[in-house]
Image (spheres, helix red, strand yellow):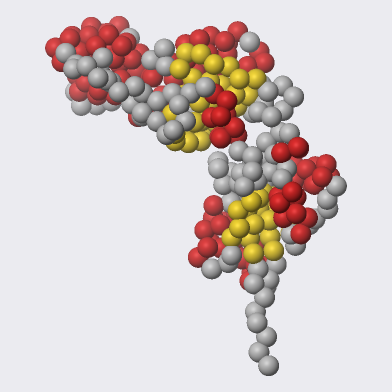
Amino acid sequence: MAVDKVQGRLRVVATPIGNLGDVSPRARQALESADIIVAEDTRHTLALLAALGLSRPLLSLHAHNETRRVASILARLSAGETIALVSDAGTPLLSDPGYELVRAAAEAHVPIEAIPGPSAITTALASAGLPVNRFCFEGFLPAKDRERRSHLAQLASEPRTLVFFEAPHRIAATLADLATEFGATRRAAVARELTKAHETIYRGSLEELAETALREENFRRGEITLIVQGAAAHSRAVDRALLRRAVDLLARELPPGRAAAIASQLTGASRAEAYELITHHAGGKKPVE
């Protein structure tokens, strides 16, 4: 008599970003019933399980070992095990490991069940006071100054609200670069330590937030999610002669990003359009920042 093959299951489980009260009954049950929990940092997840009064076997899965561990995890799933995938906080895969495993499980036709819950992205958007009907998540910006400014220059005309994660020791420099590339008056919000005891949300222009980051030490502490309003559509016609004159004068005295931002505010052109004109004036090469 043939015996049906036991079907394993991968559960992608969202965990609290701070407040333990955000653990849903469904997430708790998924963790409690898992044959093994695959975790970004087993020490962090061990502490979470202890706080919840649970005890389950753990296996690490992070950026440095995910590729080589996928095959063995798939073998366990094929053998019928139920595996829970978690990150250190929030919803897995969003700037966290797990994509390779989920993709491989999907290709192997393993049932995948997402257990929704906390996310710093949606939590920050809900409290930022900025448009949320359309947004895009950019994750972490490049750590190196030049690469970060170059990336921001490409995003300056993006009309959707932008969501970033940022390290506390880089937030002041990032806000200064944003003010240069996007314009000092663009609205933004910095959400730190969301759902935790010291949760703080700073709102204002990029210039104001950059100044606050330098002035307030607590601003540069904890987990940070940065929300920036998208670029406004320019409804009036741009005076091309005025734009060219502004770019010509400003580029002589200022770095390209700053010159483009000011030219944009003076003429109504997009920041990207002004930056492109500066690049063209430099002989088709990107000017040195």
- Residue at 48 percent across and 23 percent down: it is 130
- Residue at 44 percent across and 33 percent down: it is 133
Please tell me whether residue 14 is drawn above or below residue 83 in the rendered image. Answer: above
Please tell me whether residue 1 is drawn above or below residue 101 in the rendered image. Answer: below
Q: Is residue 45 visible?
A: yes
Q: Which picture quadrant has residue 270?
A: top left
* Percent x, y of residue 8: 65, 68
Q: Quadrant of the C terminus?
A: top left
Q: Is residue 49 left or right of residue 187?
A: right
Please tell me whether residue 263 is drawn above or below residue 87 in the rendered image. Answer: above
Q: Which picture quadrant has residue 191?
A: top right
Between 98 and 161, the residue placed more toward the observer is 161
Between 27 and 82, the residue placed more toward the observer is 27
Between 168 and 49, the residue placed more toward the observer is 49
- Residue at 60 percent across and 53 percent down: it is 114
Q: Is residue 126 left or right of residue 194?
A: left
* Percent x, y of residue 229: 44, 23
Number of marks in picture: 0
